[in-house]
């Protein structure tokens, strides 16, 4: 349970950092890469959760 929360926290921190970079640089193009990173992070979290479910 702690692992999932830690991974979620890391993804959230990465998202905040990316959004901060976008605001600082003012480049809209970076929003696409931020969205891609968030999507990738969500997929990885879902994969890990599925593995844990099968492990039980």
Image: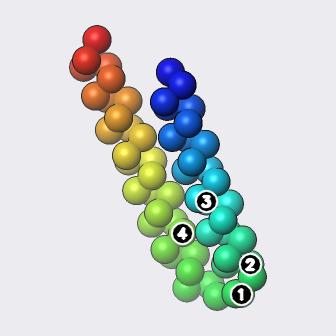
7 left or right, relative to 9: left
Provide the secondary structure element on which disc 3 rests. helix
Q: Label 3 vs label 1: CA separation?
A: 16 Å
Image location of residue 45, percent across then percent down: 42, 40
17 left or right, relative to 5: right
1 left or right, relative to 14: left
- Label 2 neighbour load within 10 Å: few <14, some 14-19, many 20+: few
Provide the secondary structure element on which disc 4 rests. helix
Of the residues under marks 2 and 3, which one precedes in the sequence?
3
Q: Label 2 vs label 3: CA separation?
A: 12 Å
Residues at discs 4 and 3 in contact (Cβ within 8 Å): yes
Of the residues under marks 3 and 1, which one precedes in the sequence?
3
Residues at discs 1 and 2 in contact (Cβ within 8 Å): yes
User: What residue did someone put label 3 on?
Assistant: 15
Of the residues under marks 4 and 3, which one precedes in the sequence?
3
User: What residue did someone put label 4 on?
Assistant: 34
Q: What residue is rendered at 56% in x and 80% in y?
A: 30
32 w.r.t. 46: above or below: below
Of the residues under marks 4 and 1, which one precedes in the sequence?
1
- Label 1 neighbour load within 10 Å: few <14, some 14-19, many 20+: few
User: What residue did someone put label 2 on?
Assistant: 23
Image location of residue 32, percent across then percent down: 51, 75
Q: What residue is rendered at 62% in x and 69% in y?
A: 18
Q: Label 4 vs label 1: CA separation?
A: 13 Å
Provide the secondary structure element on which disc 1 rests. loop
Identify the mark at residue 26; answer none if there is no mark. Answer: 1
17 w.r.t. 40: above or below: below
């Amino acid at each position: 349970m702690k692992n999932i929360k830690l991974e979620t926290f890391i993804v959230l921190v990465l998202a905040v950092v990316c959004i901060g970079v976008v605001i600082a640089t003012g480049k809209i193009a970076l929003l696409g890469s931020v969205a891609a990173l968030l999507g990738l992070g969500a997929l990885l979290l879902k994969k890990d959760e599925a593995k844990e479910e099968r492990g039980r």
